[in-house]
Image (spheres, rainbow, N blue to C red):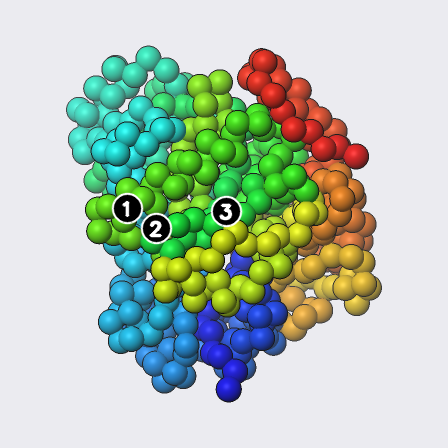
Amino acid sequence: MTEKVMLVGSGGREDAIARAITRSGATLISAIGHENPSIKSLSSKYVIANELDYRKIEEFAVDNSVDIVFIGPDPVLDTPLVNNLLKRGIPVASPTMEAARIETSKMFMRELMKRHNIPGNLDFKECFSEEEVNEAFRSLDHDVAVKPIGLTGGKGVKVMGEQLKTVEEARSYALEVLRRDGVVLIEEKMVGEEFSLQAFVDGKNASFMPIVQDYKRAYEGDTGPNTGGMGSISDSTFTLPFLSDRAPEEARHIIIDIVRSMNSENTPFKGVMYGQFMDTPRGVKVIEINARFADPEGINVLSLLKSDFVETLHQIYDGNLQGDKIFEKKATVLKYIVPVGYGSDPKPGEIELDREIFQNGVDVLYASVSGDMYRLKQTTSRSLAIIAKAESIPEASDIVDSSIAHVKGNYYVRKDIGRSEFIESKIRKSMALLGDEKFTRIQR
C-alpha cells in the first residue's frame, strides 16, 4: 500500500515540496489555502481550508489516516497543529509550537544564542515602552534594524540606511511597532552579503543543503520595497562566489550550536531549519533563524535534491538522520513572476503559459494563482516561480530569461537576478568589504 504524506500549504515552496513527495513514490494528501493548480493535480485528495484553521486540518489528517505530515508555511507553525497531531499519534516532520519559537519569536532566538554563547549574535534591545525605545536609541552608537518580534513575511523589518533614512525615522517606526504589538526589537545593523543555509534537523543532528541567496527588494539593482522574495540563486560549489571561504563553515557551526542548545533545554527541533546569515568583516552574523524551508530558497535546494525526501521526513521524525543528503552539483536561478506593483500596490491580472515553456529546460512552480496549468488568475502575491539548472549561475539565469517569453500577460519579473554583471558587482563589493578574505569563485 502506498504511503500517504500530508502537506500543509499552497505556495510556490509547497508546490516544490509536493513534487519532492511524489518523486519519492508517496501518495500526496494536501491541505491548501487556495486552489493551486499544480498541487491539486499532484494530490490524490485535498481540502481547501484557511491554513490557520488547525482544527479542520487536524481532522482532515485523521480522517485520511495519513502516515506523516509536513508543514510548509511559517504561520501554521505558530498554531497548535503539530502538537495536536503528535498527541493523536500522527507523525510530523515539522517542529512543535514550542520549538518553532526559534522563528516565531525573534527574542526567543536572540536570548537562546545569548544564554549559550553561540557565535554570530547581534547587540539587541527588547523594548516594551516609549521610554525604553528612547533609551535604546540614546545608548546605541551605530545604525540599527527595527524588527517586530513575531512573523512578518519578510516585510516588517526596516533598516537604517535602507528603508529608514534617519535616526528619527527609525525611532518613529520603532514606536509604531511598539504601539501595534506592545514590544519591539532594536538590533545593530550589519553590513555584508546575506545568504541562506537550510538543514534537515532530527532534534540532535543536522544535514545541510546548498547555500542560497534570495533577493527581497522589488526592483532591479536591489532597490525598491521589500517583498516576500523576487528570486534566488545557488552555485554548483554549494557556496556562492561572493562569500568568504570561511562563511559556510561558520554558519554550519551556528546551526549545530542552536540545535544542540534547544535539545539541552528540552525543546528539540525536528524539521527544516534555515538560517539567514550575513558575511561580515566580524565573521558570520545571524539575521534570523527560521523553522521551515525558505521561500524561494527552498525551491532551489529541492530542485537539486537526489535523496528520497519522504525517507528523510521519517528520519527527522524518528530522530535518526542518516548521513548527508545528496544534491545535484549544478547552479540554479529562480525568478518569481509577480503582479505589476507587487511590493507596494499590486494589480493582479491574468497570465497565460505557452506549452513550449515546459520544453525550455525550466521548472514552473505555481504560487498564489488559480485556474488551470496554462491560464491563471493572479492574486496580490507572487504568481509563478521559474527555475533553471545549469553549470553556472549566469547560464541558468539566461535559461530562465529565455523561458519568460512563453509567459503572456501583464506581470513583472526581476531579470537581473543571476546575471554575470550582477554577480561580478557582488564579488567586487565583498572584496572591498572583506579585504584579505579568501573567496571561491566559479564563474564560467
| Residue under numbered circle 2 | 204
Give the left or right position of residue 408, taking residue 34 as reference.
right
Which of the two discs, 3 and 1, labels the residue nearer the N terminus? Answer: 3
Kind of element beneath mark 1: helix
Are the residues at dot 1 and dot 2 in contact (C-beta closer than 8 Å)? no
- Three-letter amino acid code at the position of disc 3: Phe
Camera-side mark, 1 or 2: 2
CA–CA distance between discs 1 and 2?
9 Å
Q: Residue furthest bottom?
A: 1
Q: Position of residue 376 (x, y in %)?
A: 65, 66
Residue 112 appears anywhere in the view: yes
Along the viewing direction, whichever of 424 and 407 lies nearer the viewer: 424
The answer to whether residue 378 is above or below residue 245 is: below
Quarter-of-image position of residue 149: top left
Give the image location of residue 83, x and y in percent. Answer: 27, 65
For badge 2, the amino acid type reads: Lys
Give the residue number, with chain letter if any, for mark 3: 208
Three-letter amino acid code of the residue under disc 1: Met
The crowding category of the residue bearing disc 1, from other C-alpha atoms within 10 Å (few below 14, some 14 to 19, many at least 20), is many
278 shown above or below 143: below
At 18% from the left and 31% from the top, the residue drawn is 129
Secondary structure of the residue carrying tag 3 is strand
Residue placed under numbered mark 1 in the picture: 262
Q: Work out how far the residue at label 3 is from the one at label 2, CA to CA, in angstroms.
A: 13 Å
Across and down, in percent, residue 132 comes to 19, 25
Q: Position of residue 114 (x, y in %)?
A: 26, 31
* Residue drawn at x 30%, y 16% as measured from the top left: 140
Q: Is residue 294 above or below residue 70?
A: above
The crowd level at tag 3 (other Cα within 10 Å; few <14, some 14-19, many 20+) is many
Residue at screen point 40% across, 46% down: 290
Q: At x 62% / y 52%, what residue is drawn?
A: 327
